Image: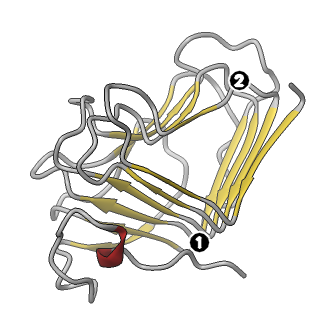
Amino acid sequence: VDLFVLRNSMVRDNHDDGHLVKSRAKANIIECSTIAGLNGANSYAIDFPQGGDNVVRGSVVEQGPNINNSGNFFINFAEENTNNAPHALTVTGTTFVNDYGSRRGQINVATTATIEGWSGNTYVGNATGMELDVDAGASFTTFATRAAAGLPAYDGTVATLPPPSCQ
């Protein structure tokens, strides 16, 4: 597949181990969507296992307390192979909500990729913030708690998440 687009969508709560969104397309666009593990046993929220040219923008990505992914990877990129070169990952205007507990969230980029243009991202979780395994020059506005971010306490529903910031 050359292009996968997920737009104005909600993906939530899988019933067993698995990724909420997984695409092997050469290019992927995820925008204006909510991807929420909630009380499901999902693994990665977003998996681009072969890399490619990928954009996540204006979305909400949440990892719930029951994930089956001890690394707490919100996004996993090119972990299986690098078949979809050239590789790029851009994330803008996206809110990451970590309801997994004390483990900080991670974005795993397993190959050399263009990582630029990241802006306007928010991380809600523990005080250590989002971890990138590459120096993306990316910064996140970080809130140590849901309350600090103006979000209600977690109740396992999408009602406690902010809306996507579609622009």
Q: Which residue is mark 1?
A: 93
**Image depth: mark 2 or mark 1 in front:** 2
Q: Which secondary structure, mark 1?
A: loop
Residues 157 and 69: in front is 157
- Labels 2 & 1 near each other (Cβ < 8 A): no
Residue 53 is situated, as x and y percent measured from the top left of the image, at 78, 37
| Identity of the residue drawn at 52% across and 18% down | 79
Q: Position of 75 compared to 16: left or right?
A: right
Q: Amino acid at mark 1?
A: Gly
Q: Amino acid at mark 2?
A: Arg
Residue 50 is situated, as x and y percent measured from the top left of the image, at 66, 19
Residue projecting furthest to the left: 102
Density class for disc 2 (Cα within 10 Å; few <14, some 14-19, many ≥20) is some
Density class for disc 1 (Cα within 10 Å; few <14, some 14-19, many ≥20) is many
| Identity of the residue drawn at 67% across and 78% down | 166
On-image quarter of the C terminus:
bottom right
Residue projecting furthest to the bottom: 150
Residue 78 is situated, as x and y percent measured from the top left of the image, at 59, 22
Quadrant of res 140: bottom left
Q: Which secondary structure, mark 2?
A: loop
